[in-house]
Image (tube, coloured by chain):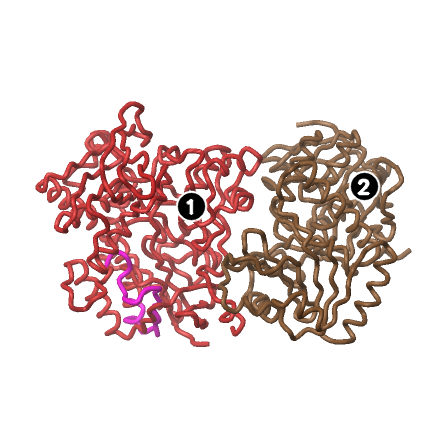
Amino acid sequence: MLTSATVVVIGGGIIGSAAALFLSRAGEDVVVLERGHGPEQASVRNAGGVRAQCRNRTERLLAMASIELWRGFARETGIDFEYRQGGNLRLAADEPALRAFAHESIDEAADGLTTQVWDRADLRRRAPQVSDRFAGAKYCPTDGHANPIRATWLILAAAKRAGARYLTGTEATHIDVDGGAVRGVRARRGGDEVRIAAPVVVHAAGPWTPALATPLGVTLPVTPARNAMLVSQRVPPLLDEFVSSHELQVYLRQAPAGHIHVGGVFAVEDTFDQRVSQAELTHLARAVEILPALRRLTILRSWAGTLDLTPDHLPLLGFTTAAGGYLVAAGFSGHGFCLAPAVGRTISELVRGTATSVDVTALRPDRFSPA
Amino acid sequence: MTAADVVVVGAGPAGLAAAAAAARAGASTVLVDAYERPGGQYFRQPASVTRNRSGVQERGRHLAARALSVGVEFRPHTAVWDATPTDLHLVTGGTVSTLAFRAAVVATGAHERVAAFPGWTLPGVYAAGAVQALLKEHDLVPGRRVLVAGSGPLPLVVAAALVHRPVRVAGVLEATRLAVETVRHPWIGAAGLWAQGARMREGLVGTVRLLRHRVPVRTGWGIVRALGDSEVEAAEVARLDPQWRPVAGSERTVECDTLAVHHGLVPNTDVLRLIGADVVRRPDLGGWVPVRTPWLETSIPGVFAAGDCAGIGGAALSLVEGDVAGAAAACHALGREPVRHTARQRAALARERRFQRLYAALFAARPGLTGLPRPDTVVCRCEETTRGEIDAAIAAGARTTALVKSTTRCGMGPCQGRICLPLVEQLTATATGVPPVPVTARAPLVPIPFDAVRRC
């Protein structure tokens, strides 16, 4: 099979689909290559947190832009992807942690993000279901969470409606470069070879991205890592907020169906293995130290996804210098779901050569290469 | 943490035989089962010790006693909630423990296959196996007027057991037209049936008993839907074509307050898949089954599989497979070469596998079963996902069971999809033409308290 496009996107997860959506809306002819039958990896295996607080500045601006876009998707489509702005609550173990939150809150306010610092008494009053072991918390009322599976499929469907062509069960095998510029992508679909001629390639294959970048002379410092989650039985509403403790290294949220999802602020590095170990389950069960009501509940299921970690835990986003037309969007280090809408829009702006709504030069993919 | 040379999961026919064989070979052997008494579904023991046992129950008790007498340690009320190639993580009444092993025999049996016909979630609809369990364990009969429907020997066995109780059997419907199929497959004859398979023999004895009690037994008929507002009041039944599709215009209504339904069994491979054993899809054997060597070892060295969890074959095949796997597991654990099959084992395996092929040819689930649920019929009871929602997910691009599961939540409830996923897999494969891949098994296999896991 031979076809052509103006942009080929490798990876049909939430980043690839968000890019395809905004590129198609801007008038580009987009082909998305997805080796699975649909979004199956980190896009649909994360906790669905949508958070602007407690982030690096570039990510904060991307997250704030994404929250606007997420609100827009909910309004425009009328589809309930369980997006709720129930707030994000970051717990402080002690007074020094609380003071650091206060400093961060000032930086955030400068960017127009409103957050509140709660002391021990505030936390008891505002979130009585949370354990009294914490010294306080930082609360961002506009943050929240969504169902990552529904949200990913919503963006995928919107991209298709905008004209993007999805080739599922199609695994990219080579990125063709000639004369210093991208010429297209070769892929395998069953036993057949597929060739798509295109001047631009957007590479958004998560932890699998480096494998096809290396032959182009592009070294992407992306490490695969397992991130496990578990879910409780259904219970009546307990929690609007997305709550996390970096001291306990766990976070949790309650989905509208009533299940409480628990994830870890840690990952088992250097593995594509998605089997959840006993040690991880034991660790995640420490969520009872945040929410004592969990003690009486049972764990229903667990699962894991594969993160794409970079050395600074920030994404690799932008054109590379190795080949003209080769744009990398990977290494999201667990932040991809929340940031996807604004990242998709930024990719479209970069490809079209228009001014970017968020300055992402700090995320350029070759920032780790010796100058 | 405790340790054993050989651990056996499941105390049904295969597990009891395996544990006894392993212990006889000199291996320290632990047998775990989620229930209080050993026996599994086939040898299910009465709850009260004062009640008389049936012949089958007597044999089960004898087997269990023999296993204990050769040194098997039995742990009742103990379920596996997580497993690796070297350890089982167990839960006994809310308390967790870990058991390290050198070799394991997984003998987890099977689940009943559920046909999601309109009305199947009404009170009064039972799996025939559940009716049998109530009878065997508590001598209880649900309802007063029971229609038994489905396929295979079990519905006949259950109906035959019911005729001696204070209950009216409104009829027995067998989906396969046995008389026609017997002509089509010359090697299927009454004599062949009689010679093979304890359960089949039981079924035929049952048929004779049913006819004597003037219970109508129809073959080539099946359930189409259950009728009633808040509970079963009647059933709509229809003649079925050879693919088990209802023949339009043949529908009839049968009054009943209870439906006992059974459309065969699905191997329970949860523990095997969690450990990482390779499985292949064998619709003739009930679904996904582990790949095994002649010693019944799976793709994971030291992990063996015996009985219905490795392919539906009935109690007699389970007994001989357990015997083979238990001895082989002991050899693996003790560092010996595996012993050769005895002549008796070879003969029994050949005979019971002939029965297994016959059972598959007659009773393996056929496509018509997938056509029964209508758009508003609930397929996943735990999450209340309907056929319509599943079809919509497939139409929106979900082309695998895992994708349908993740987009509709079907199979994500407390039962972990044991009931609905075989049907979802069939619906998805039929609609998309994409060959199914097994859904990943995940801990915990049974719901487990946060507090228990935290203290692991």
- Which of the labelled discs sits on residue A326, or is there none? 2
Magenta region, residue range: B21-43
Residue B169's x, y, as percent? 17, 43
Residue A29's x, y, as percent? 75, 29
> Disc 1 or disc 2, which is closer to the eye?
1
The residue depicted at 28 percent of the width and 75 percent of the height is B71
Residue B243's place in the image compared with B157, above or below, is above
Q: Is residue A199 visible to us here?
A: yes
Residue A74's place in the image compared with B110, above or below, is above
Residue B72 lies left or right of residue A215; in this view the side is: left
**Given the image, on which type of amino acid does mark 1 rest?**
Cys
Q: Chain coloured red: which letter?
A: B
Magenta segment main secondary structure: loop
**Given the image, on which type of amino acid does mark 2 rest?**
Tyr
**A231 is within the stretch colored magenta:** no
* Label 1 crowd (10 A; few <14 / some 14-19 / many >=20): many
Quarter of the view holding residue A94:
bottom right
Quarter of the view holding residue A167:
top right
Residue B131's x, y, as percent? 25, 51
Quarter of the view holding residue A274:
bottom right
The residue depicted at 22 percent of the width and 48 percent of the height is B143
